[in-house]
Image: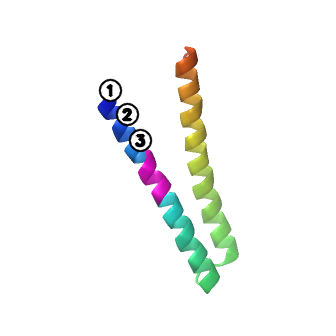
Amino acid sequence: MELIKRRLANLLAVKSLVTVILTVVFAYLAVTGHVSTEQFLTVFTVVIAFYFGTQAEKSSSGTDAASGGTQR
């Protein structure tokens, strides 16, 4: 069980790193004019929504498990 928790934590760290790198790359491309502002906002919104959505889901499932809640 500990191995699974450790691997999940590593996966989340990788997702965080990918999110930051992708944000920096798209910001650079937008500033240099290779990507339009609308394209940047679309991609950035999707990435940030996915990142924070998975973080909220992780927090929510952790709270349910700690309180003895059941999954539907």
Give me the residue at 55% from left, 16% from top: 70
Q: Main secondary structure of the magenta part?
A: helix
The amino acid type, in three-letter code, at marker 2 is Lys
Sequence order check, earlier mark of 1 and 3 = 1
Q: Secondary structure at mark 3?
A: helix
* Residue at image mark 2: 5
Residue 20 screen position, x and y as percent: 53, 62
* Residue at image mark 1: 1
Left or right relative to 3: residue 46: right
Quarter of the image where the N terminus is located: top left
Image quadrant where residue 58 sits: top right
Badge number at residue 32: none
Eyeballing the image, is 30 above or below 13?
below
Are discs 3 and 2 less than 8 Å apart at CB? yes
Range of residues picked out in magenta = 12-17
Q: Total label count?
A: 3
Are discs 2 and 1 less than 8 Å apart at CB? yes
